[in-house]
Amino acid sequence: MDRHRLLKLLLLFIFTALIARAAYLQILNGDYYYQLSEGNRTSVRPINAPRGKIYDSRGEVIVSNRLTYNLYLMQNEIPPASSVKNILAKLASLSSLSENRLLSNLSSSAQQSVAEPVLLARHLQKKDMVIIAENKDILPGLLVKESSLRDYIYPEYLVHATGYIGEINRNELVSFTKQGYDYSGGDFVGKSGLEKEYEFYLDGKNGAEQIEVNSLGEKIKTIGIKQPISGDSLVLNVNFKLQKSAEEILQKNYQALRKAAAADEDRPMPTGAAAVVLNVKNGAVLAAASLPDYNLNLFAKGISNADYKKLINDPLRPMVNRYIMSAVPPGSIFKLVTGTAAMKELGVKGDTTFYDSNGRFYIPNWSRPFRNWNPYGEGKLDFIKSIARSNNIVFYELGYELYKEFKGEKLAEYAQKYGLGSKAGIDLPGEKSGLVPTDQWKKNNLDQGWYPGDSVNLSIGQGSLLTTPIQIADLIATVANEGKSYQPQLVDKIIDSQGNLVKDIKPLLNIDLSQEIDQNIFKTLKQGMHDVVNKNYGTAYRHFKKFPITVAGKTGTAQTSGSANHGWFGGFAPYQNPEIAVVVLIENSGSSAYSIPIAREIMAYYFGLRNYNNSAAKVYYYSQQEDIYQPE
């Protein structure tokens, strides 16, 4: 009898426990387990979309994608008795994957539905893929899926223009979502260069496959597929053959100068270099280089903290794109601006004569002289020859006359007309505006007024004036085109994965001075630039001696505060019918003499002059004779 009563009590207890468990499951957690039960029937598996490619102007692929594999967690395919944290701990113990990283990625996806895949890791190593496949029984709910890895085919060329990608951060995620774009944590996005500038074109739209699975997470059938959409591709104005040649020419000379400086303590050590080749007829950027640079493939899988710190702590700043970010005084290239203002406002002509008696210019009642690069004086010379000789005394006088007539206004006004002090508008993020100092700027920033010495300094591109190589390329193009220049543009068009046109980027007129400045003024400036290169007294003559194409140019040696001078050269060719503008800057090189041969060799390559040889200028930079010949 007691045994029957005990059995009844036991059955009652079991029955009560079952009712309590059912109530717990259905009332308190019914929604959760309904969703989980639905998830046990259906599962959504990702189909990754490749990022758009980047082509050069000839159709050569510069940036592409290659096959890789990502790891996902399918929460609804995990058996009820298993724990996600335990599965990830086991995975970490068996593979090279970090448990902290796996848990972090899981946490960042906490708001997702249990039916959605959670991205745990990108770019799996082969050995980890094998481990996951061989241990599927103890690692349920893990899915290895094909994806694409950014493939920088020429990782050491076109570095700063191309830019790199990296994992989206919180601020980007919030910003992109507000703009109406669909991004998730773990996505890779453009962080610099064209990758960033054209992110919303390059980014592909991921697809998904909805499948029915059994209780073991095994696929039974496909319910539906949302096809992925590949990102759009960029077709550049850049000719990669010219780009590669320009970079190699710049690199060769830059490294030779650094080597020579390391061997001779009296020679300055260059800290960076930049070159730009611009189509003057439409603003197309045909080549652009910045040194030092880095290897783009460091970023393809996600750069390590150690490698990133090494780059950002490098004193030579390899991640700085110098042709849009290096804002320094332009030196005597600015004389083109001063000359424009003097001819327009003071009535100076090409044959107006000046006299340099002793290489010194004095502001009345000032005791300190402003000096020419030639300390002996050059005597009588007309305005065109003063450009060819880059005679500071003539331009000091013009700057002072402009000050007497207009204070500091006119030089700044004409600099701004040429686009200085404003971004050139190249399709890259991070471009600097530079600086055109004015009376108001001095008052606001230095608590000083504008003095005659400020105009005299500014007249030769010194003082607080700051310009970038892309701005100077625009300036050269404006003079070459006699008043017109176009917005610098790296991308020519955007196409979809089938080659259909998505966007055709037309030339955009950036500067138009042709109506307000007489064409004779530009012709005079161009004649002076012609004589810089082609007259035996020109400051760039010996570097272009016997050059088969007629070139026009202007040298510039810019003084710096406490460092060696910057060396500039800006020119265009052919003189009679300009096609290209070429600008070269070597930071802290000491003289423009080191920039001229780089521009010459880039031009030689562009015009197909493969056999051109100027023995008078050949590897001249090793010679101490440069200490005798100072072009400015």
Image (spheres, grey):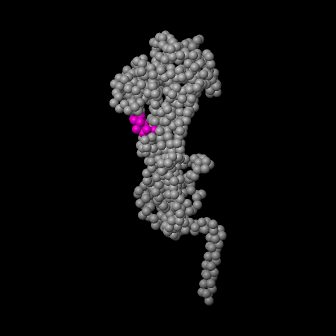
Q: Residue at coordinates 49% horizontally, 17% vertically from top-left?
A: 384
Q: Residue at coordinates 61% horizontally, 16% vertically from top-left?
A: 404
In depth, the one of 606 and 208 nearer the eye is: 606
Q: Is residue 324 visible?
A: no
Q: Residue at coordinates 44% horizontally, 54% vertically from top-left?
A: 68
Q: Main secondary structure of the magenta part?
A: helix
Give the number of marks. Answer: 0
Is 243 a magenta residue? Answer: yes
Outermost residue, right side? 27
Is 569 a magenta residue? Answer: no
Q: Position of residue 21 (x, y in %)?
A: 62, 73
- On screen, residue 362 above or below 46: above
Give residue 267's quadrant in the image. Answer: top left
Q: Position of residue 608 (x, y in %)?
A: 38, 32
- On screen, residue 192 above or below 118: above
Q: Is residue 411 visible?
A: yes
Q: Position of residue 378 (x, y in %)?
A: 46, 12
- Residue span colored magenta: 238-249
Q: Residue at coordinates 65% horizontally, 72% vertically from top-left?
A: 23
Q: Position of residue 104 (x, y in %)?
A: 54, 54
- On screen, residue 481 above or below 208: above
Give residue 3's quadrant in the image. Answer: bottom right
Side (left or right) of 610 relative to 169: left
- On screen, residue 384 above or below 242: above
In depth, the one of 481 and 448 nearer the eye is: 481
Q: Quadrant of the N terminus?
A: bottom right
